[in-house]
Amino acid sequence: MSGTITDLQALMLSADPEADLRAAYRTRFAAARAEPRLARPPGPLRVLLAGYSGACNTGADLRTGEIIRQLRDAFGSGGIALGIITVGDHPLPDWGTVTTERIEGFPPDAVRDLCARYDAVVVCEGSLFTSTFSDGLATMLTAFLGMAAAMGKPAIAYGAEADRMSPAVEQFVAETAREALVIARNRASLERLEALGLQAELGTDTGWSFADAGMAAAQALLRERGWDGHAPLTVVCPTDPFRWPLIADPERAMFASLTGDVAPEHHSGMMFFQPAETSQDLCSAFLDGIATALHEHDRRSAEPRFTIVVGMEANDQDACLELAQRLGAPAPVVAGTTGPHAIVGILRSASLLVSARYHAVLLSMAAAVPAIGLAYDQRVRALFAEAGHPGLALEARAPGLAERLSAGLRLLAAEPDAGADFAAFAAAQRAVQRAAGERVAAYLRGSAD
């Protein structure tokens, strides 16, 4: 890893660190292609799973866990050895024997070195080909595909979303992922990937097969917060859509490390959320709209309802606390302090779900939970459209949320079959996921033999 310190120093002083990283990745791809190909050593197939594990994101962790289960079912416990990229400091779920890996030092060197130690790479993050959250994350995860392919190894993006990208990231994806097996998780993503010239296939999200909901733990958490076990249960899953995307600001990060003056917008490393002075007011109005509509819905209900706020990621805690206060609801249940099994149990206990979180909707559909989605990118819109109810996905950033959500709740009440439609869609998607898992396993076997 010679030159790492110099490269990191240059990155911290860069006027455009994202562009410099993309250039460094491209240089390392070219160098990897020029190196001799080595035969795979004997023993189990070593597969690196690159994603968003370790950040207490319920959906990301359950997605990854289901990929692990599928691969072990396909190869047997002795036929595969798994490494997991971790991006946070939180403990991983109980996935059995896995090797935890971290991105340390200069990211292009870390990606190269990690790919060199494994026989194949599976990128398991759903929000992959998108600038919604971070150009840097999209670039790095795509780089795992490019580096594995440059080394002549299987490179797979499994259950990937393709949405709006900045022009530079779009170009990087088009050239870097062209040799990978890309399985899109919805038709909108497939069309987007095909427009970039990639040979993508239609699949689905990998979380559909998750079955081990912690119903007993969920019931206990709800009763601790005052639910009587009988009142209709409204579950609300907010987030702050306005703090994204992350922006690289190495000068600000360096100043913070020298002075200890860490801004509330700091995410990690040189990455920062959007400025609080703009995002906070927008998020407050968003939460106000949700609360107003739900209060009105409760007044229309024939019987008293019980409302609980659920945070699907630890990052959602502030939004959850603020919304619970507006709703007069008990303390929210938030990932990081509550495990994913109990969270899914709560989702599947609901009689109504209102969610800005994609996986909250997905994971509740198997239990036929009627739901309204609050969409701030393509994911929630595509999910409801493919389930046959596009009108139940509302634009989170559009004005007049309270009125639109109230209308959506009335629409949902007028569509009594929506929950049954969701359950049927979930069953169909589980079949698609099984087929996609078989495709991934066959690709790994064929490419690695």
Image (tube, rainbow, N blue to C red):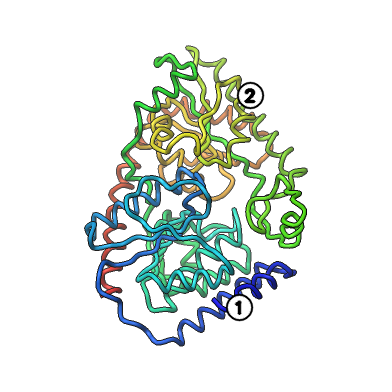
Q: Badge 2: how crowded within 10 Å, few (<14), some, or many (20+)?
A: some
Kindly identify the residue that appears in the image at 64 percent across and 32 percent down: 287
Among all residues in the image, which is located at the extreme top?
303
Residue 100 location, quadrant: bottom left
Left or right position of 58 against 331 = left
Three-letter amino acid code at the position of disc 1: Gly
Viewer-nearest residue: 117 or 140: 117
Q: Is residue 30 above or below residue 245?
A: below
- Residue 15 in sight here: yes
Which class describes the residues within 10 Å of circle 1: few (<14), some (14-19), or many (20+)? few
Q: Nearer the viewer, mark 2 or mark 1?
A: 1
Residue where numbered disc 2 is placed: 325
Of callouts 2 and 1, the N-terminal one? 1
Question: Would residue 335 be found to the left or right of residue 97 on screen?
Answer: right
**Horizontal and vertical percent position of residue 331:** 55, 24
Nearer-the-camera pick, 155 or 352: 155
Label 1 sits on residue: 3
Residue 153, picture quadrant: bottom left
Q: Pick the residue in front: 40 or 22.
A: 40
Q: Position of residue 295 (x, y in %)?
A: 60, 20
Q: Quadrant of the N terminus?
A: bottom right
